[in-house]
Structure formats: C-alpha cells, structure tokens
Image (tube, coloured by chain):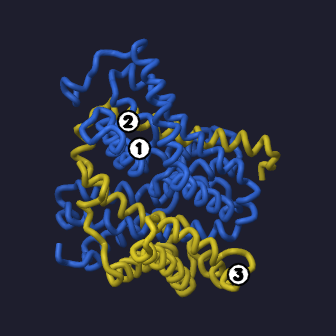
Chain colours: A yellow, B blue
Amino acid sequence: MPDLIDGSENVSVHGIFNWIFLLAIFSIITVIGNFLGYKHPISGSLIGMGILSLITLAGVWLERYLPFNVSSILYISVIGILLAFPGMPTSDFVLYYVSQIELLAIVTVFLAYVGIGMGKSWDEFKALGWKAIVITILVIAATYYGAAIVAHIVLVLTGVPAV
Amino acid sequence: MKKNPWRDYKLHGTVLILVIIAELIGTIEIPLTKDVAITIMPLIYTIILGLVFYLAKPIKWIERKQARIAEGAMMLFIGVLIAKLAVSSGQSIGLIFKMGPALILQELGHLATILVLPIALILGFKKEAIGMTNSIGREPNVAVVVDKFGFNSPESRGVFAIFIIGTVIGTIFISFLVTFSLSFLPLHPYAFAMASGVGSASMNAAAIGPTLAAFPGLETQIEAFAGFSNLLSFCVGIYIVIFVALPLTEKVYNWLEPKIGRDSIIPKKEDE
C-alpha cells in the first residue's frame, strides 16, 4: 500500500505545460459551472480563474524550484493573502475578479475529480468491514466537533458577538 | 502512461458533464421538521456520480487509468481551491488576527478523536486502535504513524484502514454531518467555519459548502476562517499529532486496554 503515502502510483503531473493545460481545463469547467449554477458572467469569471490559476502555478513552481522543503499549499496561501492584502496595489483588481468565482463552483468541479479518483480505493474499502467504518465515522465526527466546540467556547469567552 | 494527463478528454469531458448535470439540478432542500432541513448541494452530486461512473460496469470510458489521472490532477487543483481561500483570508486579515486565539486553540480540539479509542477497544481492535484514533488519518497522519511504528505494524494497519475508508466515505459523510450540525447545534458561525478545516482538502471543501449556504452574507469571513484554519491544520496540526496526540493515544491505550480490551479480532479474519 505504499502508493497511498508517496503517491507513486499517481500519474505524476510534471512539467509546466501539463500544469498550464490542466489548470486551463479546470478553469473552463469551473467557469461553466459558475455560470450555470450562480449566473456569474463568463468573461469576468475567466479572468478570476486566470488569477487563481496563476497563483497556483506560481506556488507549484516555487515548490519545485526553491531549495526549501515547503509544500506548494504554503506558497499558494502566502501569495493569495499578499495579493488581496488591504492596501496592496493588486488587491482591488484581484478581489473584483476573484469574488466573481463562487467557492462552491470550484468545489463542485474539484469533487468530481475526487469522486472518480477515489473509485480506485473501492476494493480495499470493501475488504475492511463494518467495525472499521464505524470507527472512521466517529473519528471524523470527533475531529469536527472537537474543533467546533473549542472554537465556539473561545469565541464566546473572548466576547465575539454572534453576527 | 506516455500521454499527457491533460489530453485525457474522456476524463475531463466526463467531469464537465457531471458538473453541468449537478449545477442544473442545483441545491435541493428536504424539510425534516419546521426548522430543520437537509440541504443537498451540487458538490454531493458530482462526488457520488464520479464514484458511480468509475464503478458502473456499462461506463467503459472511466477506468483505473482515468482514476489515476484524476488523483494526480487533484493535487494540482487543490491549489486553485487554496488560492481562492487565501484571497478571502488576505481580504479579512485584520479579522483573522482578532480571532487568533480561537483559530489556534481549535486545533487542539482535534484531540477529541482519542475519545473514540474506548469504542475501538470494545469493538475488539488492539494496537490498531492507536493508529485509528490518534487523528483523522489523512496523508500526513499516515506518514507519521508509519514513520513511528513501521510499515507492517498493527498501528499502521489501523491508520491505513481509516485512510481508505475516509477516502471513500469521508467527504460525503462530513457534508451530511455539517448539514445536520448547522440545524441542531447553536454554535457561532465562525466556529463552524474554523471547524471545517479538518486537515483534508476535499473534506474541507465538502464542509464549507453547507456552512456558506447556512450563513448568507458572511461568505468572505467563512471562507477566510475555513482557509486559515485548514492552513493551520496543515502547518501546526502535524506537530500536535507527533508531540501530543500520538503519545497521549498510547498512554490512554496502555491504561484502558487491560480494563476493556477484548480478544483481538484482527489475526483471525479481517472481514467478519
């Protein structure tokens, strides 16, 4: 089962052209979903997805070519936060277009790929038995409620009004 | 695997069709009682249809190869999701600093998984239970457990089981869990937002959906907290697992196992 950990069984998505074309396909599908589900105009959404794709590309590229052992998720987060930071010259432009992309439109496309990809684990899943399924469900619920309840208590104690 | 992943028109075409179907159906609300309704969102349709397309025998154009490409492409597409959340975080950076204590302390809330350990013991798991209940069992957690106990240890078997089951049902389960919790639990909207950062991009995505729908007008703040909390789970969460959660799970195991442990179910047959 080592492929689960190091991803060696994944089709490695290497090369900047692969990244660009894949991001373009993902952007087009998302823009269509964004238009059908949320009625955002196509031209603005395309620019919004272009910005998000460029941030992703920069993050993935930095992960590959900088000598630090840092995940692209960190680079992407930092770039995204900086570009939208209040007062940055880029922030108005970035916010105007990125706000036309509904997060849910991205999530819907992303989870379609997740759904197809997770089919691969189906046989292993079936072999595991109901007891392990019960434990998994409880573990996920415990993670979620643990965080939600601690966050709620701290928010109430620090006097954050329930909006 | 010579062909470039972006050229697999069967995969991307299928995703496009799934997305069009999902967005055209739109969100469905099923009222349970006067104030409680289950919301089923397009993201649920695409994930279930994706799995069905892979498993359905008559659909021949989505096979193992497409699943592998989808999995590889996912690693890149997570970036777009993270970028969108980061832009919302940047926009609300002042608010994030103000809510700093809640954001950081809720990471410790993930330790609640250890509460499941006694149930795992009662169900007959032995050392597998340590791997199963120290965390939510996603990629980084699997790596930590395997690193500490070795690939063929019972602890690693436990975390592999959680990983596989979480991969298949986790995303669907958490979206229903969140939908129900939003109706029944009177928690702060920001608390729901922060809790959705469980340390798995797809589960994070599935948990934000219903939360956004439940609090219209707070989209930016919810995205900001969810994104930042996921980032924290990613950077800080792993150290909490290594230095706190895993040692604590072992301590609780050594204390509880002699008291409530059953005969091991594992060496016999795993599937009852």
Residue B194 in the image: above or below residue A77: above
- For image coordinates 49% across by 45% down, the residue present is B176
Residue B151 x %, y %: 26, 42
Q: Are marks 3 and 2 on the same chain?
A: no
Check the image and name the residue furthest to the top.
B259
Categorize mark 2 by other alpha carbons within 10 Å: few (<14), some (14-19), many (20+).
many
> From where the camera sits, is residue B24 visible?
no
Q: Is residue B13 toward the left or the right of residue A145 in the image? A: left
Asked which quadrant contains residue B123, the reply is top left
> In the image, what residue type sits under mark 1?
Gly
* Quarter where residue B12 is shown: bottom left
Q: CA distance from mark 1 to mark 3?
A: 39 Å
At mark 3, the secondary structure is loop
The reply to whether the C-beta atoms of the residues labelled 2 and 1 are less than 8 Å apart is yes
Category of crowding for the residue at label 3, using alpha-carbon neighbours closer than 10 angstroms: few (below 14), some (14–19), many (at least 20)? few
Q: Residue at x 61, y 42 (%)?
A: B36
Query: In this rendering, is residue B137 above or below A47?
Result: above
Label 2 SS: helix
**Mark 3–mark 2 distance (CA, rounded to whole Å):** 45 Å
Residue denoted by label 3:
A88
**Disc 2 and disc 1: Cα gap in Å?**
8 Å
Q: Is residue B52 left or right of residue B33?
A: left
Amino acid type shown at disc 3: Met
Q: Chain of mark 2?
A: B
Q: Mark 2 or 1 closer to N-term?
A: 2
Label ID, residue B131: 2
The residue under label 1 is B137
Give the residue type that dot 2 points to.
Answer: Gly
Residue B51: percent from the left, percent from the top? 31, 55
Number of marks: 3
